[in-house]
């Protein structure tokens, strides 16, 4: 089950955010305004999945729409130093499988967030 991470650092001047996690997903949700539980409006989210094997991320933002990326860990082996993880292009998104798993693992999330994320997963179109 996805559980909310508590005491998430909020950065002055940036959008408020909430973070949910389990062994398969990391979900970060950004809000336009509000006090988290009252008047919040979702500005965007990043749903990272398969986080322990071949991590990818579906991101949606109100101002720029969708992106789907693979997360390059920055680990290359050999004598090179580890670099910072970065997002790199990754086209195909298995939305049926991810939607089904998210539905199951998000049962305890705030229903407004859960429904919004599920709707956005299902609306994603690969270009």
Image: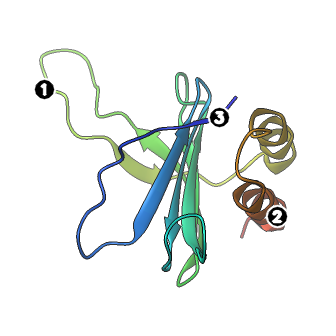
Task: Answer whether labels 3 and 2 touch (C-beta < 8 Å).
Answer: no
Q: Nearer the viewer, mark 2 or mark 1?
A: 2
Disc 3: CA contacts within 10 A as few (<14), some (14-19) or many (>=20): many
Residue 95's place in the image compared with 12, above or below, is above
Disc 1: CA contacts within 10 A as few (<14), some (14-19) or many (>=20): few
Disc 2: CA contacts within 10 A as few (<14), some (14-19) or many (>=20): few
| Percent x, y of residue 12 | 23, 70
Which residue is label 3 attached to?
2
- Distance, label 1 to label 3, CA atoms, is 33 Å
| Residue located at (45% from left, 42% from top) | 71
Q: How many marks?
A: 3
| Residue located at (83% from left, 42% from top) | 103
- Distance, label 3 to label 2, CA atoms, is 17 Å
| Percent x, y of residue 44 | 56, 69
Which residue is label 1 attached to?
81
Comes first in the chain, label 3 or label 2: 3
Query: Could you tell me which quadrant the C terminus lies in?
Result: bottom right
Comparing 10 with 26, the one in front is 10
Q: Nearer the viewer, mark 1 or mark 3?
A: 3
| Residue located at (80% from left, 39% from top) | 107
On the picture, is 90 further left or further right than 117?
A: left
Which residue is label 2 attached to?
119
Disc 2 element: helix
């Amino acid at each position: 089950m996805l559980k909310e991470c508590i005491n998430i650092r909020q950065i002055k001047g940036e959008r408020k955010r909430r973070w949910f996690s389990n062994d398969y997903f990391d979900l970060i949700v950004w809000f336009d305004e509000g006090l988290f539980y009252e008047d919040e409006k979702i500005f965007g989210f990043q749903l990272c999945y398969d986080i322990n094997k071949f991590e990818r991320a579906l991101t949606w933002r109100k101002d720029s729409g969708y992106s789907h990326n693979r997360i390059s860990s920055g680990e290359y082996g050999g004598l090179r130093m580890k670099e910072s993880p970065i997002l790199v292009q990754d086209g195909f998104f298995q939305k049926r499988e991810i939607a089904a798993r998210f539905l199951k693992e998000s049962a305890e999330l705030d229903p407004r967030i859960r429904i919004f994320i599920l709707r956005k997963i299902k609306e994603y179109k690969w270009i």
